[in-house]
C-alpha cells in the first residue's frame, strides 16, 4: 500500500499526481452473497457456485460489478488522508466501466490519480481517476472517475 497524506491547502498542488495504491481486498463468496442479499441481485453467475462452475463463461462465480465499484470507498480511504478535513462527501461518478470480471476468491486493489481540484465553498472538489485491478489479472476490473468533496 502507498498513500498520500496532505492538507486542504496542499490539494491543488497534487493535481495530476498518483495518490497511491490500496491494500489488496479479497472478494469471497460470502461477501458476494451479502451483496446479493443487500441489493436483491441473486443472478446465478454470482451466487450459484455449482451452476457457475458448470455453465458460466467465467469458469465459476464472479463478483457483481457494483460490488467491485462499492469497494472503491474503503480502498479510497486508504489512499488519501486530508488531515484538516472535517467532512468528506462522495459527490458522484462521472463514468464507470467494468472491463474484466472479478472471479470469487481473487483480490482487488485501487490505484488512484488526482485529475482535477476545484475550490468549492468550505473546501475542494476532487475528480479522481480510479483503476481497480485484480491480483494476477491482465487488465483492470473497474475503471472509474469519482468526484469527492473535502471540506474543512
Image (cartoon, rainbow, N blue to C red):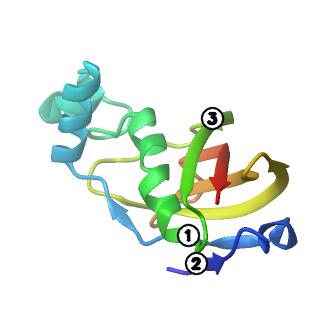
Q: Which element is circle 3 on?
A: strand
Q: Position of residue 36 (x, y in %)?
A: 24, 28
Q: Residue at x 42, y 57 (%)?
A: 74
Residue 21 pos. (x, y %): 56, 72
Q: Which quadrant of the structure image shows residue 85?
A: bottom right
Task: Please state if 96 lies on the left or on the right of 44 as rendered.
Answer: right
Residue 25 is tagged as none
Give the mark nearest the N terminus, 3 or 2. Answer: 2
Marks counted in the figure total 3
Disc 2 + disc 1, Cβ < 8 Å: yes
Residue nearer the viewer, 152 or 93: 152
Q: CA distance from mark 3 to mark 1?
A: 18 Å
Distance in Å between CA atoms under marks 3 and 2: 22 Å
Q: Position of residue 93 (x, y in %)?
A: 65, 35
43 left or right of 20? left
Disc 2 versus disc 1: distance between alpha carbons? 4 Å
Residue located at (19% from left, 31% from top): 47
**Point 55% across, 60% down: residue:** 86
Decide if residue 117 is on the left or right side of residue 148: right
The residue that appears at 43% across and 42% down in the rendered structure is 70
| Quadrant where the C terminus is found in the figure | bottom right
Q: Residues within 10 Å of mark 2 (few under 14, many from 20)?
A: some
Residue 92's disc number: 3
Q: Looking at the image, do the residues carrying marks 3 and 2 touch, with CB atoms under 8 Å apart?
A: no
Please report whichever mark, 3 or 1, sits nearer to the chain's N-terminal start: 1
Q: Which residue is disc 1 drawn over?
A: 79
Sequence-earlier tag: 2 or 1 = 2
Mark 2 highlights which residue?
3
Locate residue 68: give its quadrant: top left
Q: Which residue is more in the foreground, 114 or 56?
A: 114
Residue 11: percent from left, percent from top: 77, 68
Viewer-proximal residue among 13 and 55 = 13
Amino acid at each position: 500500500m502507498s498513500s498520500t497524506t496532505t492538507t486542504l491547502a496542499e490539494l491543488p498542488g497534487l493535481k495530476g499526481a498518483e495518490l497511491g495504491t490500496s491494500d489488496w481486498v479479497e472478494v469471497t463468496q460470502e461477501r458476494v452473497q451479502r451483496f446479493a442479499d443487500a441489493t436483491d441481485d441473486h443472478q446465478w453467475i454470482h451466487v450459484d457456485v455449482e451452476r457457475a462452475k458448470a455453465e458460466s463463461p467465467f469458469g465459476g462465480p464472479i463478483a457483481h460489478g457494483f460490488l467491485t465499484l462499492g469497494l472503491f470507498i474503503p480502498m479510497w480511504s486508504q489512499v488519501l488522508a486530508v488531515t484538516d478535513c472535517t467532512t468528506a462527501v462522495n459527490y458522484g461518478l462521472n463514468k464507470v466501466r467494468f472491463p474484466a470480471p472479478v472471479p470469487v476468491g481473487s483480490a482487488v486493489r485501487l490505484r488512484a490519480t488526482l485529475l482535477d481540484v476545484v475550490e468549492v465553498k468550505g473546501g475542494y472538489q476532487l475528480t479522481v481517476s480510479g483503476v481497480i485491478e485484480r491480483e494476477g489479472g491482465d487488465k483492470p476490473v473497474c475503471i472509474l472517475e469519482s468526484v469527492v468533496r473535502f471540506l474543512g
